[in-house]
Image: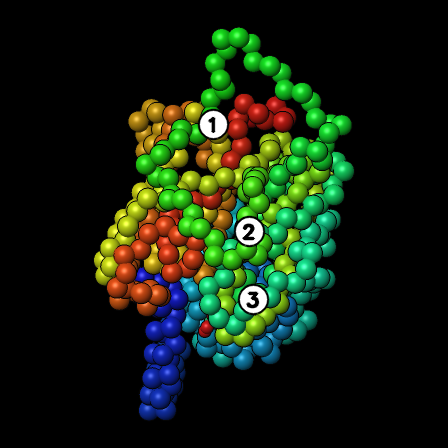
């Protein structure tokens, strides 16, 4: 499958097809009417009462669309009321039919993913039948209560907000290197994070944000427990993951500007956003720990968009009141040592993750830039079994999705999680910034990445005994 098969492209094709269809419509309308009338004789079932907005469709839109399609949301129009829904029915029909909306790019049966956005077949058919039957309003008495979004934060009012101290000015053009901002949280106790949301100040130019957390040695002087010295001859603790030097990325090139350079130490990655993903909610029973005294570093990737803009991005946290069963940790595995030859249409790049003790994986984030077309992850266990655990045949750079598993993946020590990403560096890839260049690993969107973020817990470090 190539990128021209993506729901986005099918959706676009459907839309231009519709324009043609409309031109033809005048001609066929009379014939169509005759067909409708002839169908009246069909057996029961084919003529179930047409769905109405109030009774059948609003509940689906409320549940599946309005987190984004609401005033202040990511979507281009609100789906919280009949009038705007009705106004956009043609686009809704195409977007729902082709799977362009709700945005979701992985295969797998319903029930595989915790955060699956896909509509069920019944929901899809209900929307399409409603539109085909004239998108009737129906009896407004049947209309359920619209969801209320009291703040612009999708996670609800945050328990803590950490914001860049000053505006950063994004120039109208040119390359902006990653900018780093260190911001103290001033937390006086450990916090268990259940949800994180990113609130870009100037969404248009914020290409991505990664947030790292560290505790400077001085911050917790009174709390610090002196490390227990290792007994003579005892083996050094094993790293949790086998090092794979063959996948190392090249050294960063020297920085061009001296503004906001990276700090000496970034700490642990705790969250990130890119177009389309501003919220991270951890599965029930898990939470991410932020230590007292944590200092956050925002790594900001800005993209110049033709006019100067000012950004001050914030991150909001929701905390749990008690420690979870399992502490969730965040990391990434990459292949930074590849070349995508100029003009090459289908280049596969592999990487792998190998834990040295049993871990549980809660979610995976496949990430490439504009040339990436699809991803596949296979889990090989020491017993010789092998399963495809995530298949993303329609990778879309505009939607950076963390795929959360409904049942976390168990990786015994010695398992291998193998990733494969495919790239189209030819001119037939409409998103390709330049098909005449060999492309290697790099930060900027015209360079490439083979990067997988993952959320995991370590079985031997469960906080509460398993009830299973
Ligand atoms: C996670 C956020 C999100 C959800 C959920 C979502 N949308 Fe969207 N929608 C967007 C964004 C962002 C765009 C603009 C995308 C673009 O132009 O590439 C969009 C665009 C659209 C469009 C316009 C497509 C076009 O023609 O350009 C339609 C129609 C649409 N959405 C319908 C829906 C419907 C119906 C649902 C629910 C069944 C839904 N969306 C769920 C975020 C969302």
Percent of width and height locating residue 219: 71, 35
Residue at which label 1 appears: 240
**Is 76 above or below relative to 283?**
below
Q: Is mark 1 within 8 Å of ligand 1?
A: no
Q: Earlier in the sequence, mark 1 or mark 3?
A: 3
Secondary structure at numbered mark 2? loop
**Is 273 above or below relative to 47?**
above
Query: In the image shown, does 461 or 27 lie closer to the viewer?
Result: 461
Numbered circle sitting on residue 365: none
Q: Report whether 219 appears left or right of 125.
A: right
Q: Which image quarter is the C terminus in? A: top right
Secondary structure at numbered mark 3? strand
Residue at which label 2 appears: 261
Disc 1 or disc 3, which is closer to the eye?
3
Q: Which image quarter is the N terminus in? A: bottom left
The residue positioned 31% from the left and 55% from the top of the image is: 439
Residue closest to the far top: 232
Percent of width and height locating residue 277: 53, 56
The residue positioned 51% from the left and 55% from the top of the image is: 178
Query: In the image shown, does 50 or 127 lie closer to the viewer?
Result: 127
The residue positioned 50% from the left and 74% from the top of the image is: 306
Q: Earlier in the sequence, mark 3 or mark 2?
A: 3
Q: Report whether 148 appears left or right of 96.
A: right
């Amino acid at each position: 499958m190539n990128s021209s098969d993506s729901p986005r492209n099918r959706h676009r094709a459907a839309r231009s097809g519709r324009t043609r269809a409309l031109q033809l419509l005048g001609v066929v309308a009379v014939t169509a009417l005759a067909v409708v009338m002839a169908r009246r004789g069909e057996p029961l079932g084919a003529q179930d009462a047409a769905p109405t907005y109030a009774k059948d469709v609003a509940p689906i839109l409320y549940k599946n669309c309005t987190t984004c399609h609401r005033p202040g949301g990511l979507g281009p129009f609100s789906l919280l009321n009949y009038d705007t829904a009705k106004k956009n029915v043609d686009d809704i029909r195409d977007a729902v039919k082709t799977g362009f909306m709700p945005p979701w790019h992985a295969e797998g049966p319903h029930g595989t993913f915790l955060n699956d956005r896909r509509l069920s077949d019944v929901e899809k058919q209900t929307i399409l039948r409603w539109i085909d039957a004239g998108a009737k309003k129906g009896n407004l008495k049947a209309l359920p209560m619209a969801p209320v979004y009291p703040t612009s934060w999708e996670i609800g009012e945050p328990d803590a907000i950490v914001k860049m101290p000053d505006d950063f000015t994004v120039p109208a053009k040119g390359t902006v290197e990653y900018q780093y901002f260190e911001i103290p949280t001033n937390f006086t106790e450990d916090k268990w994070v259940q949800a994180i949301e990113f609130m870009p100040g100037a969404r248009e130019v914020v290409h991505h944000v990664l947030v790292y957390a560290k505790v400077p040695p001085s911050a917790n002087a009174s709390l610090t427990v002196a490390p227990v010295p290792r007994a003579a001859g005892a083996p050094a603790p094993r790293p949790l993951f086998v090092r794979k030097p063959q996948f190392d990325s090249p050294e960063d090139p020297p920085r061009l500007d001296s503004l906001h350079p990276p700090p000496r130490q970034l700490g642990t990655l705790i969250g990130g956003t890119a177009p389309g993903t501003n919220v991270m909610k951890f599965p029930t029973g898990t939470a991410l720990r932020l230590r007292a005294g944590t200092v956050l570093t925002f790594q900001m990737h800005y993209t110049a968009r033709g006019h100067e803009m000012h950004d001050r991005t914030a991150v909001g946290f929701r905390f749990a009141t008690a420690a979870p069963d399992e502490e969730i940790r965040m990391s990434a595995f990459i292949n930074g040592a590849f070349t995508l030859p100029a003009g090459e249409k289908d280049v596969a790049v592999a990487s792998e993750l190998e834990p040295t003790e049993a871990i549980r994986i809660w979610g995976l984030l496949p990430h490439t830039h504009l040339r990436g077309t699809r991803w596949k992850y296979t889990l090989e266990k020491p017993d010789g079994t092998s399963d495809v655990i995530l298949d993303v045949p329609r990778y879309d750079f505009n939607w950076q999705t963390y795929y959360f598993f409904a049942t976390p993946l168990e990786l015994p020590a010695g398992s291998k999680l193998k990733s494969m990403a495919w790239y189209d560096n030819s001119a037939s890839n409409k998103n390709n910034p330049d098909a005449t260049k060999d492309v290697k690993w790099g930060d900027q969107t015209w360079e490439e990445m083979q990067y997988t973020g993952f959320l995991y817990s370590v079985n031997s470090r469960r906080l509460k005994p398993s009830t299973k």
